[in-house]
Image: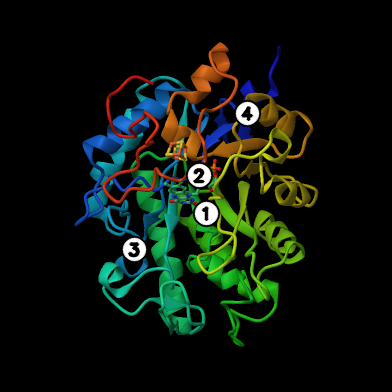
Amino acid sequence: MNYCLFTPVAIGQVIVPNRLVRSATHDYLADDRTGTITPAQLELYRRLAEGQVGLIITGHAYIHLSGKASPRQIAVDDDSRIPGLSQLTRVVHQTGSGSLIFLQISHAGRQTRPGLCGQQPVAPSSVYDPVSKIRPRELSSEEIIKVIDWFVRAAARARQAGFDGVQLHAGHGYLLSSFISPHTNRRSDDWGGNWEKRSRIIREIISGIRSTCGPDFPVIIKMNATDHLPGGLTLEEARDIAVSLEKAGLAAIEISGGMNEASLGSVWPGLRKEEEEGYFVPLAAQIKKAVCIPVIGLGGIRTLRVAESLVASGQVDLVSMSRPFINNPGLVREFRSGRLDKSPCLSCNKCFNPRGIRCVHGQTAGSASQD
Ligand SMILES: Cc1cc2nc3c(=O)[nH]c(=O)nc-3n(C[C@H](O)[C@H](O)[C@H](O)COP(=O)(O)O)c2cc1C
Ligand code: SF4
C-alpha cells in the first residue's frame, strides 16, 4: 500500500521526510540545576531519529527562569545552554534518517510555583489558579516587551544550536495560551480584550524571530483551540487567531486543548475506539479549512490506518503522538516495516515520572534497551 503518511511535506522552507511527528514531550531528563541536556536525552533523541520520526519536537524548554514549569526541564534561557543543545541536534542529524528536530520554547506563566521559577508566577492578569493555588502577578506592558525578547533570543539560540525550527508553546494554559484565553487574559490595554489584542504577543514574537533568525527558519505553534473551560477560548476565535498568525509568517500549526484547571486536559487517559482516536483532530480540521499552512492533528492517535486516513482524507497534513513514542521511540520504523500496525501504548499515563519518563509496560525512554 502507498501511504500518504510516508510522503514528505514542506514546513516553511524545510522538508519533513514523512507526516509523523513526535509531539513535544517533557522527559524530566535534563540536568535539574541548569537545564542542560544529559546523556540520557541524547540517547532518547538518537533512538527517535533512528526510529525515523519525521519531525521530533523537544519537550518544552524554558526561555527564562521565571517561566520554568517543571523539574529537570530543558533550558534555553542563556547562551551557555547552546553547546548542550548543539549536541542534541547533532545526535539527531548524524543518524542520517532525515529526521528534523524543532525546539519547543515556552514560558510557564501562572502554571508553576515560586520554588521552581524563583518568584511569584506571572500572567497577563492576576487570575487565581485553583490547581497550583497561585494568584499570579500581572505583567506590565514593559515586562511583556521583555517576554517577547526572551522568546526571540531563545529562538536565535535554537538556530545557533542547529535546530531546524522552533515551536511556540501556546497551549495547555502556559503563558502564551493564557494570553489568548479570555478566561486568563482580562486586560484592557493593547495586550487584552478582543482576540486580536490577546494574540498580539504571539504575532510580535513571530515577527521578532523572523527578523532575527531569517524567514527561512520555520516558526510553528502548538495552540489550544479550546480551553475546555466556560469563558475560555472558543474554536471560532482560535480559527481567527490562526489566520492572523499565518499572515504574520507562521509555518505550521499543531492543535491541542485544555489547561491545568480545566475538566479535560491535553493528555486524555484511557484507550479509545479507532473512530475516536485523534481527539483534537475535529478542531484541527476546522482550523485547516481557514489556513493554507500545514496543520498537525493529535490526541490519542495509536493506529497506523487511523493516522493514514486522517492525512489521506485531508483533515490534517501531519499527525503527532507523544505517549506512543515513550512506549517505543522506534514506532515509525515499525509502522513502515509492517512489524506493527498499532502502538501498544495503553494511554494509562503511568509514564509521568519526575525522575525521567518511562513506559511502565516495558520501554525506558532514556535507556539503551532495544526498540
Ligand atoms: C510525559 C508527557 C510530557 C509532555 N510534555 C509536553 C510538553 O513539554 N509540551 C507540550 O506541548 N505537550 C506535552 N505533552 C502533551 C503531548 O505532547 C500530547 O499533546 C498529548 O500527550 C496527547 O498526545 P498522545 O495521546 O499521543 O500522548 C506531554 C505529554 C506527556 C505524556
Ligand atoms: S506508561 Fe507506557 S502504556 Fe502507559 S501511557 Fe505511558 S507510554 Fe503509554
Amino acid type of disc 2? Phe
Residue at (68%, 73%) from the top-left corner?
230
Residue located beneath label 1 in the image: 210
Q: Quadrant of ligand 2?
A: top left
- 170 lies left or right of 212: right
Task: Give the numbered dot on residue 143.
Answer: none
- 328 lies left or right of 229: left
Task: Give the numbered dot on residue 68.
Answer: 3
The tag earlier along the polypeptide, 2 or 4, is 2
Residue at (32%, 51%) from the top-left corner?
74
Amino acid type of disc 3? Lys
Query: Is the Cβ of the residue at disc 4 closer than 8 Å to that at disc 3?
Result: no
Residue located beneath label 4 in the image: 303
The tag earlier along the polypeptide, 1 or 4, is 1
The tag earlier along the polypeptide, 4 or 3, is 3
Is label 4 in a helix, a strand or a loop? loop
The tag earlier along the polypeptide, 1 or 3, is 3
Q: Quadrant of residue 276?
A: top right
Camera-side mark, 2 or 3? 3
Residue located beneath label 2 in the image: 217
Query: Is the Cβ of the residue at disc 1 closer than 8 Å to that at disc 2?
Result: yes
Is label 1 in a helix, a strand or a loop? helix
Q: How many marks?
A: 4
